[in-house]
Image (spheres, rainbow, N blue to C red):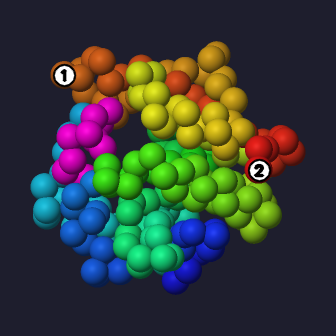
Amino acid sequence: MIILETPRLTVRNWRDDDRDLFREINADSKVMEFFAQRRNHAEADAMMDKVRRLIAETGYGFFAVEVKETGETIGFCGLAKADIAPVLPEDTIEIGWRMATRFWGNGYMTEAARSLLDYAFAQKKLDEVVSFAVAGNQRSRAIMERIGMTRDENADFDHPRVPDSHPHLQRHVLYRIAATADRPE
């Protein structure tokens, strides 16, 4: 199921032949630098299966991102329920991404995220989309800013699912963008 296409990318649901890439990005220490845990193969497979079902059932989730020219799956970008009540209301939709390190620096996630914001506002009729990351995650924050999101400093929070064993990963910054906001091309 293709969600959308950009000039260089296809954003779609996951296929069985994406498992190696999904495992790779969920186990890579650089990709997962700002997460409390890495996932082994079984955990990554279970997560991918859950994401596939969610996309099929709701149309929301973290979609596979594929480079059109090569057909390679490079990571994911998607729209999903934030699922961190009471920090954010239950119906809040977030945009998020992860990508294999060998594809970093090509603007792929910025391209996918921009198109997904268009999709969120035009197709899903959302009023607002948020994104959040560990305060020190400058790579993700840079994407948020490039796609036109603005930090809401008054809404920064300690993530309720980050264990006390990882205090350096608890503080998160929150970015927002409204459907009515001007966005960079």
Residue at (61, 22) in percent of width and height? 155
Residue picked out by circle 1: 165
Q: Can residue 86 be seen in the rendering of this structure? A: no
The quadrant where residue 164 appears: top left
Name the magenta segment's main secondary structure: loop
Q: Where does residue 93 sit, x and y in percent of width and height?
A: 61, 49
Taking the image as shown, residue 37 lies to the left or right of residue 73, namely left
Label 1 vs label 2: CA separation?
A: 41 Å
Q: What SS does tag 2 mark? A: loop
Q: Label 2: few (<14), some or many (≥20) within 10 Å?
A: few
Nearest to N terminus: mark 1 or mark 2: 1
Taking the image as shown, residue 156 lies to the left or right of residue 118, namely left
Q: What SS does tag 1 mark? A: loop
First to last magenta residue range: 26-35
Residue at (13, 64) in percent of width and height? 42
Residue picked out by circle 2: 185
Decide: is 109 above or below 66: above
Which amino acid does the dot numbered 1 rest on?
Ser
